[in-house]
Structure formats: C-alpha cells, structure tokens
Image (cartoon, grey):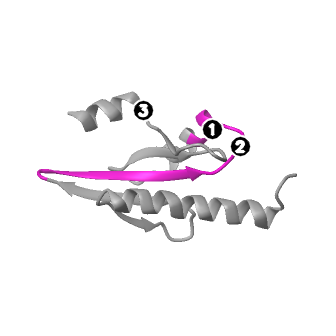
Amino acid sequence: MSLSGAGRRAKGVRGELEVKKLFAAWGFTVRGLEGEGDHIATRKDEDRLLAFHLETKRQERLYLPKWYAQASSEAPEGFVPLVEYRRSGEPWMSVLETANLLALLG
C-alpha cells in the first residue's frame, strides 16, 4: 500500500528529524533552511569548520544521481552537499563526491 501525499510528507519529516538527531549526537549544530525542507549541519573541529548541506530522503526507490544533483545545486557556498537516505528497516546511508570525502579526511 502506498502512502498518500500527506503520509509521504510525514515520513519525510520523520526522516529529517532522525538525521538531525544523528548529526547532533556527533556534535553538529543542525538548522533548517528557511522555506525549504533542507538542513545545514556545522561543527568546528580544531582548526577547520565542517559544513554540510543535508538532502534527506526517506524513500524505498533510490534516485541517487537526481538527489545528489539536487543537493549540489541547493548547497550554499562553502557547504559540502551530502545526501542522507534510507529505506524502511535499513540504516542511514550517506552519498558525497569522492573529492569532498578525501578533502574531509585530509
């Protein structure tokens, strides 16, 4: 059985809250972007600022290239676009550009 439009949105909002709590548990400050469902997560580590634009998807069908393109086009200047997604019963997964991952790993 598929969810109604309101049911899909509620599922998405629950997913965004789950991701927000995960990032907060790791010391990130997470805030929503006005007028959008997206969030940004920031954390100051020693001499650098970690800054992500979170595109959260709580869906059964995966459209990773489309979602990453969306995250990239909407990310504010200086923020790493990051797609957070999960299917029912699965853990949260992250998708980011390999160059960004390597830069973060230093």
Q: Residue at x 66, y 37 (%)?
A: 63
Q: Which residue is mark 3?
A: 97
Tell me if 72 is positioned left or right of 105 in this view: right
Instruction: Give the residues drawn in magenta, as a range.
Output: 46-67
Q: Position of residue 30 (x, y in %)?
A: 39, 64
Could you give the CA–CA distance between mark 2 and mark 1, rounded to whole angstroms?
15 Å
**SS for tag 3?**
loop
Q: Residues within 10 Å of mark 2 (few under 14, many from 20)?
A: few
Q: Residues within 10 Å of mark 1 (few under 14, many from 20)?
A: few
**On screen, residue 78 above or below 17:** above
Magenta span contains residue 39 = no
Q: Residue at x 71, y 43 (%)?
A: 60
Question: In the image, what residue type sits under mark 3?
Answer: Glu
Q: Nearer the viewer, mark 2 or mark 3?
A: 2
- Residue most extreme to the left: 47
**On screen, residue 73 above or below 38:** above
> Observer-nearest residue: 33 or 9?
9
Instruction: Using the rendered view, name the quadrant where residue 87 is placed.
Output: top right
- Residue most extreme to the bottom: 34
Q: Position of residue 93 (x, y in %)?
A: 50, 41
Q: Which residue is mark 1?
A: 66
> Observer-nearest residue: 27 or 51?
27
